Image (cartoon, grey):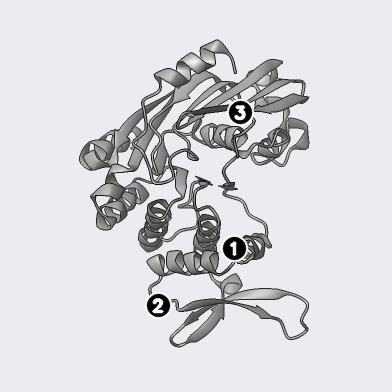
Amino acid sequence: MTTSMRRQTAKAQPAIPVSTAGSVLDSLSVRNFRGVIQGTIGGFRALNVLAGRNGCGKSTVLDAAYLALSGDSGALSAVGYRRTLRGDLATTYLVPFGRSATIEIAATLGDVDVGFSAEWGGGGGTSRHIAPKEWKAPRVRFVGVRRDEKDLEEAFAAVADLGAEAVERLEQLVRAAHPGVRRILTRMQADNTRPYLSLVVNEGSYPIHVAGDGLQRLFLVACHAATLKGGVLLIEEPEAHQHPAYLTLLARVLAEAARSGTQVIFTTHSLELIDRILEATAEVGEEALSQTAVHLITLEGGRLAGRLMGADDAAKAREAVQLELR
């Protein structure tokens, strides 16, 4: 982590303390990554909305946070392939314009500095994670727009592996969106070849696999949140596939996840989802509202910047985002 990167991080606006302080992201500095030549985003809180125009660097912020927090020095290639199926381009343009450069990402988590560095060019290179020896990386999950057919099963299996408390937390999150859901069950097909998940309501049960894309995506987000108490959930455009009425349910899940100890950072182009988030956090209480932030992201000439607006000044935040999105 270079001296200049440390200086940028130190100047970042401090975050309001959250219940999981010490394991969550406070600020992030990025150099020579995707279209970003240099920039810092500060003031992360428990629930964070990244808004802005297409190509302004919102998804790059998510990718950079994943690289810095996951502790996985081999994650860069996976991050590259998340954007495109073109193998010949996936890793080449992890640096600006595909030229050789040193990728540097620095993150602060309370009083801990961690980072990620890579000498990269021509579609390949070497990378390393930078952190104090005693530092333990928080659990981090990334939910992209695309998903595999087995994502639901794997996400629920991760919840079940953590035991009854995690399953209860998942059911609590699902009920925040669907109060009628009583239980989540794993059932087997008649030939016992493959399990499926069922949501139990008063009238009976039905497989989540045959529900609409919006409900499945909402369930997937809830599964990841249930495994990340004290961790970080990164989501790309959670409004994808959602009916407008479901945005209220989605907002309740995200607000409840943040309230119960998961740091949530997501990108969006939906002013309506931002409205629902502000409403959902206000319903939870003043503390939840104070721990919610809207970051208006801009990228000009490769310079990444973020304008921080606390949700406690919801009207101001909404007006600024509305001007940018519309």
The quadrant of the picture occupied by the C terminus is top left
Residue at 39 percent across and 57 percent down: it is 256
Q: Which sits in the foreground, 96 or 251?
A: 251
The reply to whether residue 14 is in sight is yes
Among numbered discs 2 and 3, the one appearing first in the sequence: 3
The reply to whether residue 303 is in sight is no
Picture coordinates of residue 57, whole percent (x, y): 50, 30
Count of numbered badges drawn on the protein:
3
Per the model, the C-alpha gap separating discs 2 and 3 is 46 Å
Amino acid under label 3?
Answer: Pro
Picture coordinates of residue 8, whole percent (x, y): 46, 17
**Which residue extends farthest front?**
134
Amino acid under label 1?
Answer: Val
Indicate the secondary structure of the residue bearing disc 2: loop
Residue at 48 percent across and 20 percent down: it is 39
Label 3 CA crowd tier, 10 Å (few <14, some 14–19, many 20+): few
Among numbered discs 3 and 1, the one appearing first in the sequence: 3
Which residue, given by chain and number where applicable, does mark 3 sit on? 132
Residue 307 in the image: above or below residue 208 = above
Q: Which sits in the foreground, 249 or 146?
A: 249
In the picture provided, is 266 more to the left or to the right than 121? left
| Image marks 3 and 1: residues in contact by CB distance under 8 Å | no
Per the model, the C-alpha gap separating discs 3 and 1 is 29 Å
Amino acid under label 2?
Answer: Gly
Indicate the secondary structure of the residue bearing disc 3: loop
Label disc, if present, on residue 159 of the rendered structure: 1
Picture coordinates of residue 184, whole percent (x, y): 54, 75
In the picture provided, is 113 more to the left or to the right than 119? left
Look at discs 2 and 1 and give the one toward the viewer. 1
**Which residue extends farthest top?**
3
Label 2 CA crowd tier, 10 Å (few <14, some 14–19, many 20+): some
Among numbered discs 2 and 1, the one appearing first in the sequence: 1
